[in-house]
Image: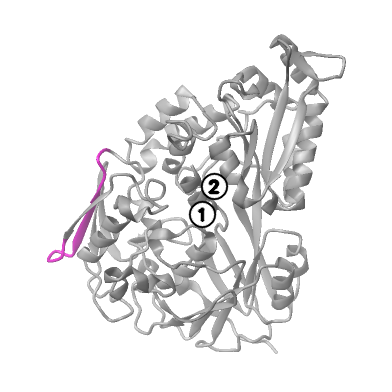
């Protein structure tokens, strides 16, 4: 589960967002200038097969191409491939013939196959394998025809869409992966030319690039000559730099978004940024093993208020587990969670045999109704306040609640190894429904990724059926499978976080943490 959570966190951190604005600033007035964007931490290892954080994804999206892209309207559009033929367990791509790597070498079908072989090789231990790259994926190249076929052992619902997150290494980096420790070797519109660890990464535009999304190029006069990713750990500092026109753009998840909103010369766009949810541990000996207890605990909580506290009032009502723009639209949440009713919650616990004792705590067969809840400290004060709110709601109906705030380093150990928890607040976000079953079904931790020990047979049946249907043909079953989880109170979607992207003197698009580099435009100064 740690591997799945790492990738999920990467993909959840930055959803469809765009910013634009006009005003004076360091970016200047014409194409060829630098576009500066703030990221929160150093990207670290730059090997696309080993990506484990959002900032690395963001950086690599400037220098690498994928077989397909997602257009501004959510449609699948061309990338390295100009055509594709999808079958239930395979997809054959016809590649563009004019693609070159940054070192001038050609990108061929064999290039694509070599990337797939590397990611799927057990020795690589790629965190993407089995999460964003289907298990058992194989590649067959035909360089003469300019075609490569990717196939899976059995039907895989979103085999085409999954390739959106497979960056293709080419040239020198394909032969010597050590090049990728602190450099890039891709066919993308920019190449890494300067690294100042923990300060900045500069990517320089490649002239002649013409194979971006739907054939986009870098020839527009307003396209930047370079992109500078500045490492700025504090959102307050990012706001200061943006307001003083020392940055072109930044992202804001916290209260500093208010400082850059409605400011002349700065435009902000707010989009969803992943779902916040909590799980009940359903292993034997845990209170959550009893569905009646899970549902009673939910009835005791006003989820609307809880979500507002967790996001400082900037969240949105969740409608599903897959992030926008999702391949299967619709609302899988509404009507599938118990209504807020503390009296009904207490009655349900009584019926389940949990009776109040003299100290006010419920007991059954001499055992206290104790809930140990874990959550991450990296989420800050709003998360701590949300945990306290949840604890107070459950204490009011006779539950002994014990909160435990954990650092990121300790979280994985407690969640997956010691399993010393009953409720786990998890910011889990994915871009395809096929990325969920490994964490929500199958073998329990430590033998598998099912960290909450879920055994929802309806979910397992529906996902098994849906996974055999191509693309959107399985959407009804994918939707029903999510709702089955909520009906059973296996996990509880509380709120969709939002992210404000603010921009000055530039326009651009970033989707699921990935730049569309050819969309970046310098809009010029107005004073």
Residue linked to disc 1: 11
The label shown at residue 216 is: none
Q: Where residue 476 appears, x then y in whole percent? A: 44, 33
Q: Residues within 10 Å of mark 2 (few under 14, many from 20)?
A: many
Q: Where is residue 368 in the image (x, y as percent from the top left)?
A: 74, 19
Residue, disc 2: 429
Q: Which of these two is toward me, 24 or 279?
A: 279
The answer to which of marks 1 and 2 sits earlier in the sequence is 1
| Whole-percent x, y for residue 508 in the image | 54, 71
Q: What residue is at 65 percent from the left and 17 percent from the top?
A: 292
The residue carrying pointer 1 sits among few (fewer than 14), some (14 to 19) or many (20 or more) residues within 10 Å by Cα, namely many
What residue appears at the point 50 percent right and 43 percent down from the top-left corner? 329
In the image, the segment drawn in magenta is 142-154
Task: Describe residue 430's horizontal placement relative to residue 198 as left or right.
Answer: left
Residue 395, can we see it?
Answer: yes
Q: Can residue 331 be seen in this view?
A: no
Q: Where is residue 232 in the image (x, y as percent from the top left)?
A: 65, 71
Q: Which residue is drawn at the image coordinates 55% and 76% (left, top)? A: 197
Q: Is residue 422 above or below residue 176?
A: above
Q: Nearer the viewer, residue 349 or 409?
A: 409
Q: Residue at image x 60%, y 53%?
A: 273
Between 381 and 307, the residue placed more toward the observer is: 381
Say if 6 sits above or below 216 in the image. above
């Amino acid at each position: 589960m740690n591997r799945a959570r790492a990738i999920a966190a990467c993909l959840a951190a930055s959803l469809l967002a765009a910013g634009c604005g006009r005003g004076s600033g360091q970016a200047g007035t014409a194409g060829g200038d630098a576009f500066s964007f703030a990221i929160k931490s150093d990207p670290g290892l730059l090997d696309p097969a080993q990506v484990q954080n959002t900032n690395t994804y963001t950086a690599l999206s400037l220098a690498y191409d994928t077989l397909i892209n997602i257009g501004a309207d959510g449609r699948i559009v061309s990338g390295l491939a100009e055509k594709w033929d999808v079958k239930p367990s395979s997809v054959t791509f016809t590649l563009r013939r004019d693609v070159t790597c940054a070192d001038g070498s050609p990108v061929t079908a064999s290039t694509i196959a070599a990337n797939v072989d590397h990611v799927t090789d057990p020795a690589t231990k790629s965190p993407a394998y089995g999460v964003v790259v289907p298990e058992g994926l194989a590649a067959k190249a035909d360089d003469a025809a300019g075609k490569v076929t990717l196939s899976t052992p059995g039907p895989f619902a979103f085999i085409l869409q999954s390739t959106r997150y497979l960056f293709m290494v080419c040239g020198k980096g394909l032969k010597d992966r050590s090049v990728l420790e602190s450099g890039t070797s891709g066919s993308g519109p920019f190449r890494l030319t300067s690294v100042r660890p923990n300060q900045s990464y500069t990517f320089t535009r490649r002239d002649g690039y013409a194979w971006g999304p739907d054939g986009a190029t870098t020839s527009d006069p307003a396209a930047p000559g370079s992109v500078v990713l500045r490492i700025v750990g504090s959102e307050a500092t990012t706001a200061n730099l943006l307001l003083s026109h020392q940055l072109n753009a930044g992202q804001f998840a916290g209260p500093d978004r208010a400082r850059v909103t409605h400011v002349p010369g700065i435009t902000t766009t707010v989009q969803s940024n992943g779902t916040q949810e909590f799980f009940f541990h359903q292993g034997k000996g845990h209170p959550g093993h009893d569905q009646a207890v899970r549902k009673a605990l939910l009835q005791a909580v006003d989820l609307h208020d809880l979500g507002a506290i967790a996001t400082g009032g900037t969240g949105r009502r969740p409608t599903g587990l897959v992030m926008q723009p999702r391949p299967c639209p619709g609302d899988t949440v509404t009507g599938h969670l118990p209504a807020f009713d503390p009296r009904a919650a207490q009655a349900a616990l009584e019926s389940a045999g949990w009776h109040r004792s003299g100290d006010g705590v419920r007991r059954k067969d001499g055992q206290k109704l104790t809930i140990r809840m874990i959550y991450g400290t990296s989420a800050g004060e709003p998360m701590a306040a949300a945990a306290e709110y949840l604890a107070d709601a459950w204490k009011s109906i006779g539950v002994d609640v014990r909160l435990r705030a954990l650092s990121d380093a300790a979280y994985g150990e407690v969640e997956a190894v010691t399993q010393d928890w009953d409720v786990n607040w998890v910011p889990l976000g994915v871009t395809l429904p096929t990325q969920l079953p490994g964490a929500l079904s199958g073998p329990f931790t430590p033998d598998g990724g099912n960290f909450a020990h879920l055994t929802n047979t309806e979910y397992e049946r529906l996902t098994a059926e849906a996974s055999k249907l191509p693309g959107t043909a399985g959407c009804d079953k994918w939707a029903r499978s999510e709702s089955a989880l909520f009906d059973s109170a296996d996990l509880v979607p509380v709120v969709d976080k939002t992210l404000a992207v603010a921009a000055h003197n530039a326009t651009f698009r970033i989707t699921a943490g990935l730049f569309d580099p050819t969309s970046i435009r310098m809009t010029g100064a107005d004073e």
